[in-house]
Amino acid sequence: MFEDERLVVEYDSRAFHNAPAKLDRDDDRREVLQDMGYEVVVRAERLSNFRRFDDLVRFTIGKRLRIEVPPMDPRFARGVQNLREDLALASGARS
């Protein structure tokens, strides 16, 4: 959650978000956040695809936060990969 920017970024993995009750709870939470003025970005498929994840960071999150994501170089690419792996571990997904 980026409170000052009114942005919430979520990762909905199929491992935890495929039961009807959980989907309903996620939808309810998302609606409350939107009613409070937050933009909610939910991406599940992008974690497993490096280019799509990079696009999400650069063009959705970076743009919304008004930050310029540095050009892709080996060090930055490794940092992005580390973030993807951390998110996958936290969500139970596989990278």
Image (cartoon, rainbow, N blue to C red):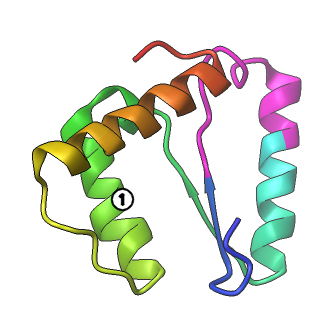
- Provide residue 4's location: percent of width, then percent of height: 70, 87
Position of residue 62 in the picture relative to residue 30 (left or right) = left
* Above or below for 3 versus 80: below
Q: Residue at x 59, y 40 (%)?
A: 11
- The C terminus lies in quadrant: top left
- Provide the residue designation for mark 1: 57
Q: Quadrant of residue 67?
A: bottom left
Q: Is residue 23 magenta?
A: yes
Q: Is residue 42 magenta?
A: no
* Residue closest to the eye, 41 or 91: 91
- The N terminus lies in quadrant: bottom right
- Provide residue 79's location: percent of width, then percent of height: 34, 43
Position of residue 82 in the picture relative to residue 50 (left or right) = right
* Highlighted range, magenta: 10-25
* Above or below for 82 versus 73: above
Q: Residue at x 29, y 68 (%)?
A: 59
* Residue closest to the eye, 90 or 12: 90
